[in-house]
Amino acid sequence: MDYDLRALSVPLPEDILKLKWGGDFETALEVTERRLQQEGLPEALKQRLLLEREILGRIPRQYPYSWQEALSMLKARFRDFSEEELRELWLSDSCDWIYRKGQPFFHQRFLGNLLKTNAALRNRDLQSDGKAFDGRNRDLLRENILRAKEEGCTRAHIHLRTTIRLTEKGAERCRGKQIRVYLPLPVEYAQVHHYRLRNIAPLPRMVAGPEYPQRTAVFETVCTGGESFSAEFEFDNIMEYHAPDPEQILAAQPSFYTEEQPPHIRFTPYIRRLAEEILEGETNPLLKARRIYDYITTHVRYSFVRQYGTFSQIPEYVGTSLKGDCGFQALLFITLCRCAGIPARWQSGLYATPYETGCHDWAQYYVAPFGWLFADCSFGGAAYREGDEERRVFYGANLDPYRVPQASEFQHGFCLPEDALREDPYDNQVGEIICEGQALSQNDGEFETIHELVSPMQPQ
């Protein structure tokens, strides 16, 4: 079935909306199904309800912990934790939650989010593993900044293997059926140089072209259980250092990448008002981008979120909740920049260092004569929380070389069109598996994606 993601801009009927956020997802789904059977339903509303039918099934599975279960987990993890503290975290929106049948339930990653963002609780952690690891990672970033400023460029050779495997749960669902697997690969553009695909197995049906915006290798097979799909690749990531001077900005600026892109990149009344408030009449494009970056890095809290595909308007969510993960912050930056007439676009993939490899999103913006610059708002925000102003400023125009860009466009289709609503219809870092018109869920443990360094990484 084809889904029109732009339909998320259509408001939901109020009865469905009340049931949804009241936590009665079963009845909300029933009402949605009934509404879809009505004759004469406007096409835009029909498309919205088809998307909502998927969303209603996905949201509650991501919030498994009741109040008492969450409290027990927190007491077991943090010294002298009290129920009053949980209530304060809940009221301050520091723990993502929804109502389920009138009772609060907490997101599956709420504990990890607190460990990442709440220093006071982290100091009371009864399981202190990982603190030395975090220190090594910060030291690596600091060394990169010093080297970039001294040498004008930093680089790293990245040699990775990405593997997608069906779990037993996924195999049970798909056994005997045709599956299509989309495995993410680096886009050969921007900072990627000397790319080489060293190995891929089994033989794919096709591999997208080098600069395809969401590049994948596509496999098709009948599932028998235990299937595994992998690609090994290497490349040089080369990052030039930029310290752009606002006095050198050209009068003529380009207009590409300044358009709206529904459902998320939209210049809603609130986005327009927020942009006006942040910019305060500033006209220099570089200084406008800096103001937007400064606002996000100093006002938006990092927070894990539920699946992107369950949100109807991400930038407004970030702009009103003042929280969000790396991709949410990047989307707010892109949307505010475009609203202000500054070209801005998406870049995402992996953050891969000698110490960790994980999914990450960031942004680019264009200012003539300097060209495309980078903005990593979540890295800048982390630096702000740690009091490292030099690092915060660095990520307003630059990146470290520990990146594997796998997507150059947000909300782009795959080279071989998918016949289902993807688990993540906007980005592609862990891949997708489609089985007879339905997307498997990594979130629900139906497949797993592993990114691993093949050889030790050393800055060059």
Image (spheres, grey):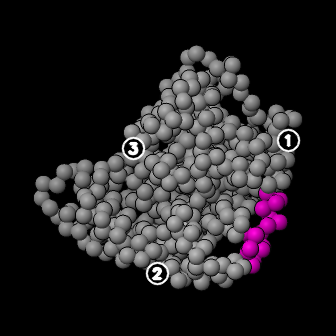
Q: Is residue 128 magenta?
A: yes
Q: Secondary structure at mark 2?
A: helix
Determine the residue positioned at 55% across, 55% down. Answer: 324
Residue 9 lies left or right of residue 65; in this view the side is left
Residue 159 visible in the shown view: no
Instruction: State which tag comes first along the sequence, 2 or 3.
Output: 2
Q: Characterize the local packing of mark 3: few (<14), some (14-19) or many (20 or more) Cα atoms within 10 angstroms.
A: some
- Dot 2 amino acid type: Glu
| Towards the viewer: 58 or 301 | 301
Q: Is residue 199 above or below residue 335?
A: below
- Dot 3 amino acid type: Pro
Q: Residue furthest top?
A: 251
Spatial separation of the CA atoms under disc 1 and disc 2: 51 Å
Residue 24 lies left or right of residue 378; in this view the side is left
* Mark drawn on residue 172: 2
Q: Quadrant of residue 98?
A: bottom left
* Mark drawn on residue 146: 1
Spatial separation of the CA atoms under disc 2 and disc 3: 37 Å
**Region in magenta:** 122-137
- Determine which residue is flagged by label 3: 262
x, y percentage for residue 66? 49, 80
Q: Is residue 143 magenta?
A: no
x, y percentage for residue 434? 44, 65
